[in-house]
Amino acid sequence: AQFVGDPVGASDLLDADPRGWWFSNPQEETFDALEKAASCKGLEESLDAVAKVFAEQGPFDGLVGFSQGAALVAMLCTLQQQGDTRFPFDFAIIIAGFKSQAAAHGSYYQEPIVVPTLHVLGETDRVIPAQMSRELASHFADPTILTHPGGHFIPASAPQKRVYLEFLGRFERKWH
């Protein structure tokens, strides 16, 4: 698999066997977040793999996803809301996320998603444009949104750390 539309060369940093949660181009096994794919493959296998991790290594309080992983976490939020008991968690942090453009994934965005979420987006992200992350956040009932001036990375400077801690603080009573 390779990642399409990767101007900073992050794909080169991945191991020799890069993976995706699903492919927008099943024939070439590539993924492009901007591609309005008529079909895709891999999502069901990915959901099964995540469900197995929940069953074998859980419980988990929350999920963190980056880029295509963030899009997957948003889908998991919908599945949980629809009563899928394979994915029990209390919150999600969605970094550089986007709404899947695959026609088969439209059902994930029908109802407002009520799972508490923190959406992190970079104003100068050239891989997942900030508007795509904002569009995904608009499908959540009460999202917390953190913007940073950078690109396609997980920001961790003091201002962002404060927002992460405030968001996570909403759930700490459960941990004591």
Image (spheres, grey):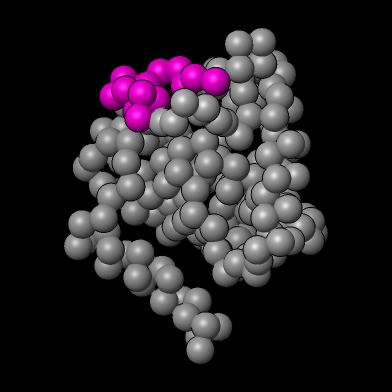
The magenta region covers: 1-13
- Image point 69% across, 22% down: which residue? 40
Left or right side of 131 for 25: right
- Residue depicted at x 54% and y 58%: 63
Residue 107 percent across, percent down from the top left: 73, 37
Q: Position of residue 152 (x, y in %)?
A: 33, 36
Is 130 situated above or below 147? above
Q: Is residue 118 left or right of residue 43?
A: left
Q: Residue at x 55, y 83 (%)?
A: 174
Asked if residue 172 is positioned above or below residue 153 in the image, the reply reads below
Q: Please state which of residues 57 and 77 is positioned toward the viewer in this rendering.
A: 57
Assign the N terminus to one quadrant of the image.
Answer: top right
- Find out whether residue 8 is within the magenta segment: yes
* 93 drawn magenta: no
Residue at left offset 71%, top offset 61%: 56
Q: Is residue 60 left or right of residue 173?
A: right
Outermost residue on the top side: it is 27
Image spot of residue 42 (x, y percent): 70, 29
